[in-house]
Image (cartoon, rainbow, N blue to C red):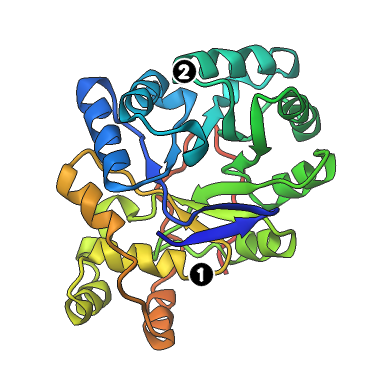
Amino acid sequence: MIHTEINGVSLPVLGFGTYHLRGPEGVRAIRHALDIGYRYVDTAARYENEEEVGQAIAESGLDRDRLFLATKLRYTDLEPASIEQKVQEGLKRLRVDHVDLLMPHWPSPEIPVAPIMEAFAKVRDKGYARHIGVSNFPTRHMREAIAAFDGPLFANQVEYHPFLRQSAVLEQLRAHGILLTAAVPLARGAIDAEPVLHELAAAHGKTTAQITLRWLIQQPGVTAIPKSGQAERIRQNFEIFDFALSDDEMARIDALQGDRRLVDTHWAPEWDAVS
């Protein structure tokens, strides 16, 4: 496993996403990921599986300090006065006394960024979260978050894959020493229809998913959190550390990028223009 460092903290460049992993099958998938060697797990209140994540971690027997655990609060739970309570409820479901990374899942359509970030700073100061980041924040909201937050922000989790250019977001985050966590990194399977990725997969004896994940983690300041409930896919997604893409191969994937956004809900903010 390759690690990256942000704000003096080392974390794996590859995490395990848990969206839609619920019930006994979800517990088994998360436990399988931990058994394979994943040490970074991402969840969210909206995923309604924090209990499953907590159960899998408990059953794994891993020491808490060997695991980087991230979760997110619903955009409807960002009233500053209630944030601490919502965080405590999540910790109870996860069976832990703190998370490593806590984020608002989306900007609130109703509450300004500044008081939300101030409330998150208080939660950090009380020891419920080691680090604070954000999720689905375009550059405008990110500027407000950086200005309002007391201390360095850790990450911005956004949709990022070979078909969605995130140049403006990446430029901003790198300028401030903040990670980009690539959500939906495999474009919900759309990578399997891309000839360039198939060609590179054949050249390296890998899958299109492995090529895509390698492309992501080779970029400075980028981590990825693929999710799968299938044991073989979970293992394959982890096997990306025994090869590397050349500069030319990276450029070929870069050239695929456009404006193919797959996650755009009715509560989403106005996204940055793709250039």
Horizontal side of residue 252 vs 128, given as left or right: left
Is 227 placed above or below 219 here? above
Question: Can residue 273 be seen from the camera position used here?
Answer: yes
Residue 169 image offset from top left, x and y in percent: 62, 59
- Amino acid type at image mark 1: Gln
Q: Is residue 104 visible?
A: no
Residue 136 percent coordinates (x, y): 57, 43
| Image quarter of the N terminus | bottom left
Of residues 197 and 138, the one drawn nearer to the viewer in this rendering:
197
Q: Residue at x 80, y 27 (%)?
A: 115
Asked which quadrant contains residue 6, the reply is bottom right
Q: Is residue 123 rendered to the left or right of residue 223?
A: right
Locate residue 45 relative to residue 231 in the image: left or right.
right
**In this view, the mark in front (2 or 1):** 2
Q: Position of residue 154 (x, y in %)?
A: 66, 47
> Mark number for residue 219?
1
| Disc with the residue nearer the chain's start (2 vs 1) | 2
Rendered position, 77 above or below 238: above
**For this rendering, which residue is in front, 97 or 205?**
97
* Residue 216, quarter of the rendered image: bottom left
Query: On screen, 48 above or below 253?
Result: above
Residue at the location (75% across, 34% down)?
113
Is residue 106 rendered to the left or right of residue 161? right
| Dot 2 amino acid type | Arg
Spatial CA distance of label 2 from label 1 is 34 Å
Q: Which mark is residue 95?
A: 2
Quarter of the rendering occupied by the C terminus: bottom right
Tell me the residue at 66%/22% (across/down). 78
